[in-house]
Image (cartoon, coloured by chain):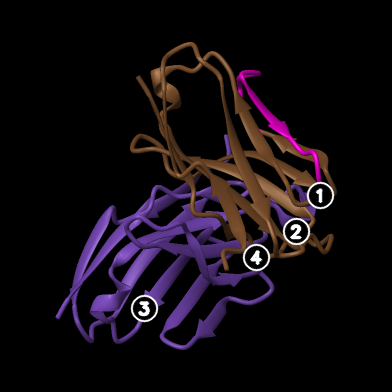
Chain colours: A brown, B purple
Amino acid sequence: DPKIIQKPKYLVAVTGSEKILICEQYLGHNAMYWYRQSAKKPLEFMFSYSYQKLMDNQTASSRFQPQSSKKNHLDLQITALKPDDSATYFCASSQDGGTGYAEQFFGPGTRLTVL
Amino acid sequence: QQQVRQSPQSLTVWEGETAILNCSYEDSTFDYFPWYHQFPGESPALLIAIRPVSNKKEDGRFTIFFNKREKKFSLHIADSQPGDSATYFCAASAAGANTGKLTFGHGTILRVHP
């Protein structure tokens, strides 16, 4: 059974629309993350949450908003979509032992295409 | 700006050879250095990681060599196999900050020819 679930696997959106990317993890971890990967940029950190609390935000735009309704959920809402937002979005999680050295496990990703 | 530089962009070796992938960093607060690999169509997965308390970490055919003074670290893959063909990313984090942020290099595409 998959331990980190991301929905949908593929997503096509039109410019200016809004989408929500879903992430659920069943590893019992209490830290979750979002990364973005595109042809132009390597894996790029976006957000980190620990115990549903925002720890770090490296996105320059407020169009990207993480939403954590439960400890094992961290969704990503993206508004006013632009073609430049096209990328694969990976959710990750780790057991936050307070040391910051915990292995991060990546989900299968959501591939977003904005037309 | 925190950066992690990785080289080469691509590397081709023959089966049985040692592949060497290199990374360097600038930020002195970085104290955790993992290597991830990613197969086509899949997500990144942790391969091996090192902390600066040591300058070498081995796990089977995979070894990280770390040079704190020069701010460089490398991944050596001994006895390379065709199944090792993938994209390899080095990364770094200031683990003490405990935000979990990993800064990744641009990746090295490794091809191992049988």
* Type of amino acid under label 4: Glu
Tell me the tag on residue B16: none
Q: Position of residue A26 (x, y in %)?
A: 70, 61
Nearer to the camera, B8 or A42: A42
Mark 4 vs mark 3: same chain? Answer: no
Mark 2 vs mark 3: same chain? Answer: no
CA–CA distance in space, label 2 to label 1? 18 Å
Relative side of B65 to B97, left or right: left
Q: Which residue is mark 4?
A: A103
Q: What range is drawn magenta here?
A: A58-70
* Type of amino acid under label 2: Gly
* Type of amino acid under label 1: Lys
What is the chain identity of the residue bearing mark 4?
A: A
The local secondary structure at tag 3 comes to strand
* First in residue order: circle 2 vs circle 1: 1
* Type of amino acid under label 3: Ile
